[in-house]
Image (tube, rainbow, N blue to C red):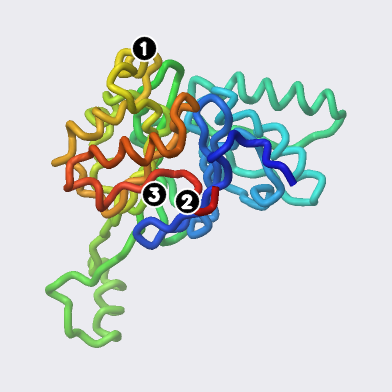
């Protein structure tokens, strides 16, 4: 069966610092990422069959290569008897996304029961008892929001180490706080963005895995990256000493570059980054 993706591009499944990420990202064409550990979908430029079951969706902005699957995903969930997904998006984009859903429902003469929740930078929600989602400020040509997923642990305070369970329970009953909350940032994803996002959301540097666009690579394309508010490879290289991440997954490459050119360009990164960086592309032997 022929692929409808350009040669050397298409579906990718990688593991970065123990975190599986599965999807497609081609600038201006389509982006979506499944994160099975979080049961979460980042973007849906399209809604293939295997993402319909994902009930939490994080949209960074409204460009169609990231959001065109919105109504299709909602429609497919209704057809399969699933409840409406929880969809997050930039606050400014919510009215238009809701209107889009309303039009689709009128065209189909059905009710998806779907709504879009504003993602306000600085706010946090719990996806489950041990997983927090924080909304980050974005930097792009249209309203944009980023996402930070963190594991939440509750550690017993040092002064109570060694106490019996009954003693700790008694302290809790008396109103004492016996644990401290720890946040372990697992995945940062700013969506489409310019390099200003690093100043706006420095938390990205500390996530275990950073999933970040790198649309432009060639030296002559840096002005184009600025014009369209995208990351250029030099923006990554210039900040090499800031990245505390265990793994950096570069994605959203422009179709102006062949896959072999992308792999070659990444070899120019500082040595402190080359061991961390993985391009979100099919492996050379899989193409």
Crowd tier of the residue under label 3, counting other residues whose Cα lies within 10 Å: few below 14, some 14–19, many 20 or above = many
Per the model, the C-alpha gap separating discs 2 and 1 is 31 Å
Question: Which residue shows up at 38% across the image and 62% down it?
Answer: 18
Q: Which mark is residue 149?
A: 3
Say whether disc 2 or disc 1 marks the residue closer to the N-terminus. Answer: 1
Does residue 280 appear to the left or right of 161 in the view shown? Answer: right
Where is residue 250, by image quadrant?
A: top left
How many numbered marks have been drawn onto this rendered protein structure?
A: 3
Q: Nearer the viewer, mark 3 or mark 1?
A: 1
Q: Nearer the viewer, residue 148 or 243?
A: 243
Q: Secondary structure at mark 3?
A: strand
Give the image location of residue 39, x and y in percent: 54, 55
To which residue does mark 2 refer?
Answer: 283
Q: Position of residue 52 (x, y in %)?
A: 68, 48
Secondary structure of residue under mark 2: loop
The percent coordinates of residue 277 (x first, y second) are 31, 47
Name the residue rendered at 17%, 47% in the picture: 272
Q: Is residue 138 left or right of residue 46?
A: left
Give the mark nearer the N terminus: 3 vs 1. Answer: 3
Specify few, some or many for label 1: CA neighbours under 10 Å numbering under 14, 14-19, or 20 or more: few
The residue to which callout 1 is attached is 227
Side (left or right) of 35 relative to 17 = right
Q: Secondary structure at mark 1?
A: helix
Q: Nearer the viewer, residue 221 or 259?
A: 259
Residue 161, compared with residue 188, is above or below; it is below
Which of the pair 55/67 is nearer the observer? 67
Give the residue displayed 12% in from the left and 74% down from the top. Answer: 159
Report, in whole angstroms, how far the alpha carbon at label 3 lies from the one at label 1: 30 Å
On screen, 251 above or below 98?
Answer: below
């Amino acid at each position: 069966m022929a692929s409808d993706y350009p040669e050397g591009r298409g579906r990718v499944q990688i593991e970065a610092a123990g975190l599986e990420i599965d999807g497609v990202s081609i600038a201006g064409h389509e982006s979506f990422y499944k994160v099975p550990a979080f049961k979460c979908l980042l973007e849906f430029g399209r809604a293939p069959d295997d993402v319909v079951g994902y009930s939490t969706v994080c949209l960074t902005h409204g460009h169609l290569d990231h959001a065109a699957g919105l109504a299709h995903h909602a429609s497919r969930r209704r057809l399969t008897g699933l409840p409406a997904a929880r969809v997050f998006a930039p606050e400014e984009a919510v009215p238009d996304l809701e209107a889009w859903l309303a039009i689709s429902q009128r065209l189909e003469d059905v009710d998806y029961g779907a709504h879009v929740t504003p993602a306000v930078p600085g706010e946090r929600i719990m996806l489950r008892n041990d997983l927090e989602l924080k909304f980050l400020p974005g930097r792009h040509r249209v309203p944009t929001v980023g996402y930070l997923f963190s594991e939440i642990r509750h550690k017993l305070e040092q002064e109570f180490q060694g106490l019996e369970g009954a003693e700790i329970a008694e302290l809790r009953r008396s109103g004492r706080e016996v644990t401290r909350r720890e946040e372990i940032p697992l995945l940062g994803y700013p969506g489409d963005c310019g390099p200003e996002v690093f100043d706006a959301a420095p938390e990205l540097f500390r996530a275990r895995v950073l999933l970040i666009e790198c649309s432009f690579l060639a030296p002559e394309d840096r002005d184009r990256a600025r014009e369209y508010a995208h990351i250029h490879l030099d923006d990554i290289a210039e900040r090499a000493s800031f990245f505390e991440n265990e793994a950096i997954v570069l994605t959203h490459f422009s179709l102006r570059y062949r896959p072999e050119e992308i792999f070659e360009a990444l070899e120019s990164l500082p040595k402190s980054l080359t061991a961390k960086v993985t391009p979100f592309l099919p492996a050379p032997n899989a193409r």
